[in-house]
Structures are given as structure tokens and as C-alpha cells.
Image: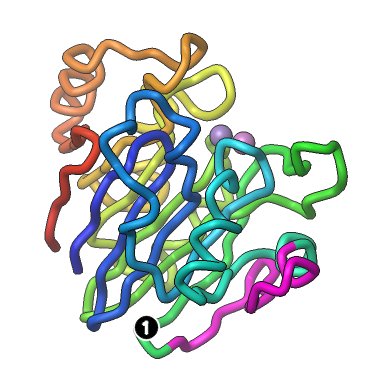
């Protein structure tokens, strides 16, 4: 499984020869200006919630690639109106896709479309493929519901927001890492704009002091599990 960071909360996941994008907000992120959305491959686009900084490039990429949008019922209904193929899910639901299994799990946040219309309840994803298990938290506060995940899934990587203000910050993400029983963390949702700027060295040191590994990727860089 290969995971590429496209800035903010945008990820590319390659698993079993399938290309997945998560929350593509790239063309609106000046820090990601070297990423061209017209060249990104996508068989699926996973969307955690309806905020602009998670859906901005969904429509353009889905229409170019024919990717299937996987999201909660309200977001799926929204994109289906634009002629995009969607797979609706809701909290607690799991589905076997051709690349692996996806479970839509709880997040504590809000979820409205840019025009203010209702985007359903926000979520995160637990993805299992190529015998690797990852958790993509989405925008969320620290929540006890995270403790449910390791009851069923032994995670290889937790992708957690760490930028604070709109989501968990660093200290809560360390607790989240305990809750999901995974000490290997990829941080996201930081530095994109002023409210969520973090000190990378402080963040990494705090994780290190708890014997955890926080990875912060440059935009466009990837890791392999
Ligand atoms: Ni959000
Ligand atoms: Mn966000």
C-alpha cells in the first residue's frame, strides 16, 4: 500500500493496483501548486465530509477519471446530481470493494456544503487492503469512539489531523493514537492556513517522548506500508 500526501487532508492511496484519492483539495491550496489535478489517477474518491477544504476538486477529478465517489449518503446524493457515480455509506457500515474493505466510522465535527446545505454527519474511514489496515480519521475531535477501532482491526497506520483549532491538535492526536492502538501516525490537516500552523519539531518530539512515530510528509511525497 502506497500513501501519497497531496497537502491539507488530501491523500492518494494505491492498493491492489487501484488508485484512491481522499478529500481532494489541491487546486485551492497554494502550498500544493506543484500538484496538477489533471494528471492524478483515481478509480475511487473517498470523501470524509462536505467542507470545501475536502471536496473542492472532487467533481473535476471524478468527471475526468470516471472515479466512483465513496461518501456518506448526503454527499453521495449531492454528487449523483452532477452525474457522478457514487457509493453511499453511513456510520458503522463496511463494504468490500475490488481493492479491499472500507468501513465508515464516527468523527466529531460538522459537515455542510459550501452553500450551507446539509452534508450529513462527518466520518472517517478504516481501509483494509494488501493485508494492511489504515485509519483515516477525517476532521475530528478526539473521541472515545476511536477505541472501538482496535477491537476489530489491528492498524498499521493512523492518519490523524493535528493542526488544532478545527480538529484535534497534537496532544489530543497522541491520545487518539493510544485509543486506536497504533503508534505509527501520519499527520495531516496542518499548515494550510494560519489557524492550523504547527511547529513540526515540537509535534514530532511530543510523539517521540510517548514512544510514537509522527510522520509529516512534504506535499507530493509518499510512504509505503
Ligand atoms: Ni471540516
Ligand atoms: Mn477541514
The quarter holding residue 139 reads top right
Q: Quadrant of the C terminus?
A: bottom left
Is residue 78 or residue 213 the one in the foreground?
78
Q: Quadrant of residue 197?
A: top left
Q: Ligand 2 closer than 8 Å to the CB at disc 1?
A: no
- In the image, taking residue 116 as reference, residue 144 lies left or right, namely left
In front of the other: 27 or 194: 27
Residue that label 1 marks: 100
Residue in the picture at 69% in, 64% down: 72
- Give 86 or 111, whichever is nearer the viewer: 86
Q: x, y (%) of residue 11? A: 35, 51
Q: Position of residue 22 (x, y in %)?
A: 44, 56
Q: Position of residue 222 (x, y in %)?
A: 16, 50
Residue 82 shown in magenta? yes
Residue located 74% across and 72% down the image: 80
The answer to whether 205 appears left or right of 117 in the picture is left
Q: How many marks?
A: 1
Percent x, y for residue 118?
85, 48
In this rendering, the answer to whether 112 lies above or below 88 is: above
* Colour scheme in use: rainbow
- In this view, 136 is above or below 71: above
| Segment colored magenta | 79-97
Quadrant (top left, top right, bottom left, bottom right) of the N terminus:
bottom left
What's the residue at 12%, 60% (across, down)?
A: 224
Q: Residue furthest right?
A: 117
Which quadrant of the view contains residue 153? bottom left
Amino acid at each position: 500500500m502506497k500513501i501519497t500526501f497531496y497537502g491539507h487532508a488530501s491523500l492518494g492511496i494505491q492498493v491492489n493496483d487501484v488508485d484512491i484519492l481522499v478529500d481532494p483539495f489541491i487546486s485551492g491550496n497554494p502550498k500544493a501548486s506543484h500538484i496538477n489535478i489533471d494528471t492524478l489517477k483515481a478509480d475511487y474518491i473517498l470523501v470524509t465530509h462536505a467542507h470545501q477544504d475536502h471536496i473542492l476538486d472532487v467533481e473535476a477529478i471524478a468527471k475526468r477519471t470516471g472515479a466512483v465517489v465513496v461518501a456518506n449518503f448526503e454527499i453521495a446524493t449531492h454528487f449523483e446530481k452532477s452525474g457522478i457515480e457514487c457509493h453511499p455509506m453511513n456510520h458503522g457500515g463496511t463494504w468490500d470493494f475490488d481493492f479491499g474493505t472500507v468501513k465508515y466510522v464516527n468523527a466529531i465535527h460538522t459537515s455542510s456544503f459550501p452553500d450551507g446545505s446539509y452534508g450529513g454527519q462527518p466520518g472517517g474511514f478504516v481501509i483494509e487492503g494488501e493485508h494492511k489496515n489504515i485509519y483515516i480519521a477525517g476532521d475530528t475531535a478526539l473521541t472515545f469512539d476511536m477505541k472501538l477501532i482496535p477491537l476489530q482491526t489491528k492498524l498499521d497506520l493512523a492518519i490523524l489531523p493535528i493542526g488544532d483549532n478545527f480538529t484535534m491538535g497534537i496532544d489530543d492526536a497522541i491520545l487518539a493514537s493510544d485509543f486506536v492502538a497504533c503508534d505509527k501516525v501520519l499527520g495531516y490537516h496542518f499548515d494550510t492556513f494560519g489557524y492550523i500552523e504547527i511547529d513540526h519539531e515540537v509535534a514530532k518530539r511530543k510523539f517521540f517522548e510517548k514512544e510514537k512515530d509522527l510522520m509529516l510528509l512534504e506535499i507530493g511525497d509518499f510512504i509505503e506500508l
